[in-house]
Structures are given as structure tokens and as C-alpha cells.
Amino acid sequence: MMTASVFLVCSWFSEFSAAFAEKFAERFDVAHKNIGEEISEAIMQVQMYFNAGDYKLLITDAVLVTWIAAAIMVIIVSILAGKPSPDLKLTKGQALLVSLTELVITTAMSFGMNRKQAEEVAPMIMTFGLVITACNSISYFHLPPPAKNVAFPVGCAITAIIYVIVMSIKFVGFKGFWITLTTPISIMLPFKLLDYVVKPLSLSLRLFGNVFAAYVFMEFLSITVPLILPGVAGLWFDIIDGIIQAIVFSYLTMSYIGENVESVHEYLAHPEDHEKKKKKSKKSEAVAA
């Protein structure tokens, strides 16, 4: 009986070793791989349909991975936040979150917002940063980053620009927001309106381009050099670059709000300068006519 068991184990191990060696050789057999086809398959969107009564709901891999990444980030932040201490002493995790929050508030104030306004925008700005960081960095674990689907960065950018407009109106009022559109001269109105189309386009293309390029490059490395190098390179292209893109997105969103607030404050502080510019503009228009 013992001999039969040993024979079965040895036979299984022999078959496993042979299969492993075969798969290992296939993994490194670049000459017989269609690299372009494999990369094309990797960047294709996975689509699933769910029936909801008479309607079909489309769910893509970007949606699923976004929820997974967001859930992971919520868990991480919850662990760092922990429970408040009775003696009000901060743990290392709490100190990290406080430092990060204070950094966001200080940066927002450097754009012209006061302390109260900066504290009000900080939660949303940090949400953008943390969620985009999680979604970008998850590709290190061989899950497709949502930003490789252009719908994700476009959705983030549209949400960001709507938030910019809403918060700008809240901080400076409708009249103040109108001032931002017509300063320094009213003829700038069409260009300022166009700016609210260009800004989300710029945000989305920057995020999509960087993440998509990094993802394709990492897929190429994983196909051609499957051991060690992808893991090392992924620390930069998946994690660090993903964090950088999240910081840039959040930073620009803050700066757009700050620009509006600061321009209104400047206008109200020196209205005579703007009146002079308007008069000069009208004279120039009359001469041109």
C-alpha cells in the first residue's frame, strides 16, 4: 500500500514537472508568439450584459475594476483611520491621513482660497486622488486599469469640471462667476466658455494617454521578459506613475477652482484697473470699426 502511494505521488510530481516545464518554455518562447495579437487581446474591453427586466445592462471590466479598487482604497483608509483614541493621541496611520489632508488644504490655499474654502474642497479633491491612485495602481496586480477605457478618464474629467463650476459659484456667487468669464474684457467670454470644454478634454486625455501607454508597455514586457523585469518596472509604470497621474488630476482640479476665486478677489480689490482695461478695449474696437 505504501509503495503504491509513493508511486502515485512520484507519478503526479513527474507529470506536474513536465507540464510546468512545458508552460515555462512556452512563456519564454517569444519567437513563436504573436506579440501584437496578445497585446490587442489585453487592451480589448471585456463586456458583459445583465438582464434587468426588458433592459440589458452593459458592465465592462473598467466598471468592475473601479469598484474593486475603490473598495480596496476604502478598506485601507479605514484601517489607517482606525478608532479615535480617548487621550486624543494619533496613531501613525491617523497622522499620515492628517498630514495628507493638511497638505491638500495648504495647496488649495496657495491657489487663492481661504482656509474655510480649502477645507470644504479637500474631501472631494482627496477622493479624486485616492480613487484614481487605486484604479491606476491596481494594474500592478495584473488587473486592467480602468483608465485604459477612455470612458473612465472622460467620466472623471466631466465630474471634475462640474465640481469646479459648482464650487466656484458657491464661493464667489453667480455674479462672481460671470466676472471670471468676462475678465479682463467682455470679448473674452467665448474663449472662457471654450476653456470649460478644453479643460476636461485635457484632464481626460492626459490621464488616458499616460495610463494606456504604461499598460501597453507593461504587457509587452510581460510577454517578452516574463520574469523579474515586469515586477521591477511595474513599481514605476503601474504604481508611481499611477500616483503621479492622480496627483496631477487633483492638483489641476484645485487650481481651476483657485483661479476663479483669485480672479474675483483681484477684481473686487482693484475694480478701477479693470474699468480702465474695458475703456481701452472699447476705444480699440471703435478705432478698428
Image (cartoon, helix red, strand yellow):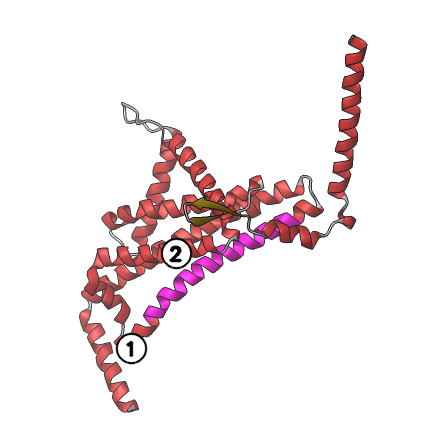
Q: Which of 152 and 5 is in front in this view?
A: 5
Q: Which of 68 and 126 is in front in this view?
A: 68
N-terminal of the pair, mark 2 or mark 1, is: 1
- Membership of 216 in magenta stretch: yes
- For label 1, the residue is 187
Counting the numbered discs, the total is 2
User: What kind of element bears circle 1?
Assistant: helix
Quadrant housing residue 153? bottom left
Q: Which residue is drawn at 48% across and 55% down?
A: 207
Q: Quadrant of the C terminus?
A: bottom left
Residue 58 visible? The answer is yes
Q: In which quarter of the image is the N terminus?
A: top right
* Highlighted range, magenta: 192-220
In the image, taking residue 37 as reference, residue 115 lies left or right, namely left
Amino acid type shown at disc 2 = Leu
Residue that extends furthest to the front in the rendered view of this protein: 54
Q: Nearer the viewer, residue 285 or 224?
A: 224
